Image (cartoon, rainbow, N blue to C red):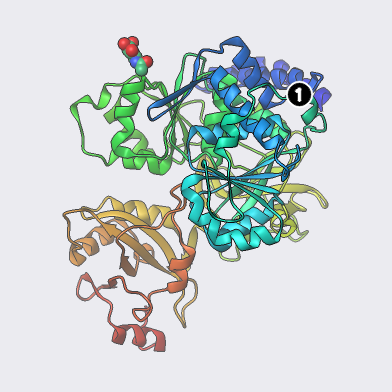
Amino acid sequence: MEIYLLSVILASILVIPFALKTCSPYVWKDIQYFGDLVRILVKFVLRRRRRPFFFVLDRFLEQTAAHPHKLFIVFEKESYTYAHTDKRSNKIANALQAHRGYRAGDSVALFMGNEPAFVFTWLALAKLGSPVALLNHNIRTKSLLHCFNCCKAKVLIAASELKEAVEDVLPSLTEHGVTVLLMTKHCDTPGIEGFSEKVDEASDAALPRSLRSDITFKSAAVYIYTSGTTGLPKAAVVNQNRLLTALAVLSSNGVNPSDVIYVNLPLYHTAGFIIGFIGSIETGSTIILKRKFSASQFWDDCRKYNVTVVQYIGEVMRYLCSTPKKDKDKDHKVRLAIGNGIRAEIWREFLNRFGDIQIREFYASTEGNVGFVNYAGKIGAIGRVNFFHRRLFPYTLVKYDTEQDEPIRDANGLCMEAPKGETGLLVSKITDIAPFVGYAQNEEQTERKRLRDVFKKGDLYFNTGDLMRIDQDNFIYFQDRVGDTYRWKGENVATTEVSDILTISECLKEANVYGVQVPGHEGRIGMAAVTVNKDAQFDGSKIYNHVVSYLPSYARPRFIRIQNAVEVTGTFKQMKVKLVEENFDPGRIQDPLYILDDSAKSYVPLTTLVYSSIISGNIKL
Ligand SMILES: *[C@@H]1O[C@H](CO)[C@@H](O)[C@H](O)[C@H]1NC(C)=O
């Protein structure tokens, strides 16, 4: 692998003079990016060569030794230096090691919201050589058990406020001999042990390295659960190698030790854990940890703590832009926002309103083997085709049939590359340096993400499930998730697009758009579950006029369902599956339902009579 890397780097250096001759205005940025890639790779290769093995934990220990008294975590009224964090995690590790129900190296599930103990416990488990499953603290009952069982954990460590959620699944945990520890002093529930007193009493001495001597780069480090939007979550295995590469995510974007990083996304997901937390370990920065994202506190926090780097997902930026404007909107020290999913129009609005902040939009997935970063700052793009990057990570867009939900294949059964300007499915070759580890205990879902016979019989690619487009200037644009489109009257409708149009109307706050099936019709017809702005009324004819002026007829949502709140997952992804199932049946849905009525030029209430006429085919849509 190293030889391969070196040869690619050498070959690439020889190519630079030619690249310079091409007159792309971005050539210097491309070369800079190439320089960054080389630096990251060299650092990674050197670390991989170190003996004993060098893991993310060792980077944390290096930072602690370098500046023990520097603040690492600030949370509400508490703050912890690197040394304090190190000692606190030693205590947890020592308390665990003394416990009968645990042996160093056992898998442990962590069920906790964003708080310092999350970080301490993860570090403790890293010191003991245990893989950690990062459970989403919003899940309950069946889903919680499913996630727990995916990682074969022997121990569950939960935050005290999640006691009831743990009690719900306790019989099954007890039956399987799981040790259940609650971060509280005492717990009366039989089968759940209060753990914090043991931690307080435990020694804060460092743990011997021998405890983790069995760990290799292939060992699972964390399990991160992905995609709660369809079916049950899957546990993506993040191994030590991957975690080591993840160290570069912030440093490669210019984050340095003097930066203060605002982490307000859940630590159980990639954005909060890998980018925010692991990224900060590499840079040795200070983390301002928030229990959860709050649009109203966001800028006040940034001012109070002198935050310089913030993380986002698209929804965060949208929420921030929809807060009431203030005079001090530009009064802060934030210089960099790093994240994923910001829309072009929100991007512009954000810069206008909050000032000169560098936005580093990137594309990556927890389990995927290819990522991009928009290093050229082109609004709306997620990245740029870079010769060197593509040599290292051979990815392609292939033509995709959204109706059949599969790649289009030629007469020989091979995929076809989508030409520039056309939307295609992003697939990336699975190689030694771009591996796909898969999901724990779920070979079926793992296999589903593998795509074979792409350009040659027998080759193997990772199917990202994301539709992208590359423009003539080589910028890459995210188009949609496979499945986030539906087809109606022979046309593809992108749900995000419709939802964006709906939410710029006066009265609607949020819109979750999906397609529902209608008997006697091909494809799916558009439906939107919406919330109405505070102090506003749903005005059927206004929305009708808005929709008609912005959307082609096939893309107009035929049905509107008014909800008090749009259901979202922990990372604000909208839940669709249940809504799709409930369809537009007024007999099943308590929420007010409206139907688009062209003759009345309005959205009018959907009656049971109209509903049954649609179902019986008397009304054609
Ligand atoms: C933020 O920066 C200002 C000015 O540089 C300084 O006076 C203040 O103490 C800083 N606040 C924190 C929380 O570091």
Ligand 1 placement by image quarter: top left
**Where's residue 495, x and y in %?**
43, 57
Residue at which label 1 appears: 208
Q: Nearer the viewer, residue 477 or 337?
A: 337
How many numbered dots are placed on residues in this image? 1
- 50 in relation to 193, above or below: above
Question: Mark 1 Cα within 10 Å, few/some/many (few <14, many 20+)?
Answer: few
Q: Which residue shows up at 60% across the image and 22% down it?
A: 86
* Residue type indicated by callout 1: Pro
Q: Nearer the viewer, residue 517 or 202?
A: 202
Q: Which residue shows up at 43% across the image and 49% down it?
A: 572
Q: Which residue shows up at 43% across the image and 67% down it?
A: 579
The secondary structure type at the circle numbered 1 is loop
**For the residue with label 1, is its CB less than 8 Å from the closest atom of ligand 1?**
no
Left or right: 8, with 603 as reference point = right
Answer yes or no: is residue 473 visible: no
**Where's residue 252, x and y in %?**
57, 22
**Where's residue 560, x and y in %?**
31, 67
Q: Nearer the viewer, residue 16 or 512?
A: 512
> Image quarter for residue 96?
top right
Q: Which residue shows up at 66% across the image and 58% down it?
A: 174
> Image quarter for residue 309?
top left
Answer yes or no: is residue 332 visible: yes
Quadrant where the C terminus sits is bottom left
